[in-house]
Amino acid sequence: MSTSENIKKIRLYGAGGHSLVIKEVLEQNNYMLTEVFDDKPSEIHPYSKNVKQGARENLVNFSHEGHPVIIAVGRNSERAEIAALLKCEYEKAIHKTAIISPTSKVGVGTVIFAGAIIQPNSKIGNHVIINTSASIDHDNIIGNFAHISPKATLSGHVEIGEGTHVGAGAIVIPLVKIGKWCTIGAGTIVLKDVPDYSTVVGNPGRIIKIKDELVSKNTNEASDMTFVGSGISSSFTILHFLETLEKQNYSGSKIFINVIDKYPQFFTGIPYGKRSGNTTLLITSLKDFLVEPERSKFKKWLNSNKEWLLHELKKEGGVLSEKWLVTHKLAIKNNEWDDVFSPRRFFGCYLTEKIEHKIKNFKAFYINASANKILNKYSVINLQFDNQVVCIKN
């Protein structure tokens, strides 16, 4: 086989310094760079050559089909926005000196630079940057569009949310969960969980800011409908409203719905969300808690999901959970839930999944995961889970 037949072809979207690093990785891996795009060709890195206009100028005429693409943009929010615009196939760029366990998974569009280490059973999302000499230990979960900077160290069982930037030389101790779209400053030592949209600096790490621009962008327009509180009542009202829109094939003017809550967890309410302990049970048996037909739907969901629900309960719940499992072992085995005082978190998971599934039924839209801006002229349902305000736009 000739050398030319071994060469794989690829395109880059972005022409700054980050793009040049990716370009060298690709060349070492025998890729041929066929095209480079940038939304601002006049502001590109001086060593980037023959750069074409990006998709924003004319999205319709952009060549979405063709050779695979890597979004070579360092800013996480911009990568997310570009990924929402493009309808391309994506490729990975992994430096030859990177060490990646065969049991770990790396998503499409992700780039892994020289000297990076990814230990067993870790999951790296799509369009992630694992930068030079970054160390990711076993059983990590790295969300889409995240950036793990040079020489950052993530210990075992760490979770990094979508779009989060972990600064150079930062250290995250085992079992810590960092939310989405956070900024962890260079050299920061993270000792405990970090909520979404937070900026953390120092040793030990402390939150100095929680971003509020997403809230302000979604609340600067008048609301047609506002819910105060995000518990069960609001959840089922929103579900009923969305079902009504579906049945009516609604095509009228935009409808703005705000959901306002003190706590950053939507559609579950405090008693039924992650803030509820595993051993916190429903105040009544299931048959007294839910009426039909919702009770049957919930029981069907329990039957399908009980394996992982019970696994988490055993893992997190402690002595009371073990006692509950023993007491209801036969009923659970036989899927007889009516007389069981099931954990509130079970119902919270069910309710969250139910609403998220309903939202996914509205497929004629694009969501910019970074800033939740409308990216095209089509209808948009824009829901910010885990933020103070939710806007549904139709």
Image (cartoon, helix red, strand yellow):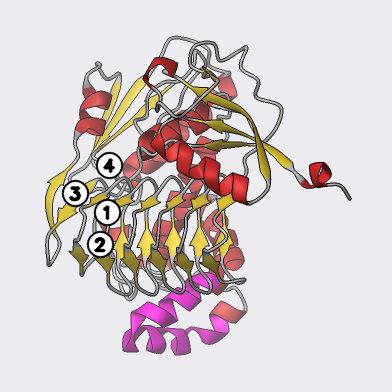
Label number found at residue 167: 1
Residue 115 vertical placement versus 384 (above, below): below
Task: Tell whether label 4 touches label 2 (CB within 8 Å).
Answer: no
Identify the mark nearer the N-term, 3 or 1. 1
Q: Amino acid at mark 2?
A: Ala
Image x and y of residue 269, in percent:
29, 51
Q: Nearer the viewer, mark 2 or mark 3?
A: 2
Residue 129 vertical placement versus 48 (above, below): below
The CA distance from mark 2 to mark 4 is 26 Å
Question: What residue sits right under mark 3 in the picture?
Answer: 199
The CA distance from mark 2 to mark 3 is 13 Å
What crowding class fits label 4: few (fewer than 14 Cα within 10 Å), some (14-19), or many (20 or more)? many
Is 220 displayed left or right of 135 in the figure? left
Residue farthest along the right direction in this orientation? 1
Is 47 displayed left or right of 23 in the figure? left
The quarter of the rendered structure image containing the C terminus is top left
* Magenta region includes residue 309: yes
Identify the mark nearer the N-term, 2 or 3. 2
The CA distance from mark 2 to mark 1 is 6 Å
In this view, the residue in front, 120 or 25, is 25
Question: What residue sits right under mark 2 in the picture?
Answer: 170
Task: Tell whether label 1 touches label 3 (CB within 8 Å).
Answer: no
Instruction: Name the residue located 37 percent from the left edge and 24 percent from the top edge.
Output: 373
Question: What residue sits right under mark 4 in the picture?
Answer: 387
Is 217 displayed left or right of 324 in the figure? left
Q: Amino acid at mark 1?
A: Gly
The CA distance from mark 4 to mark 1 is 23 Å
Is 169 displayed left or right of 375 in the figure? left
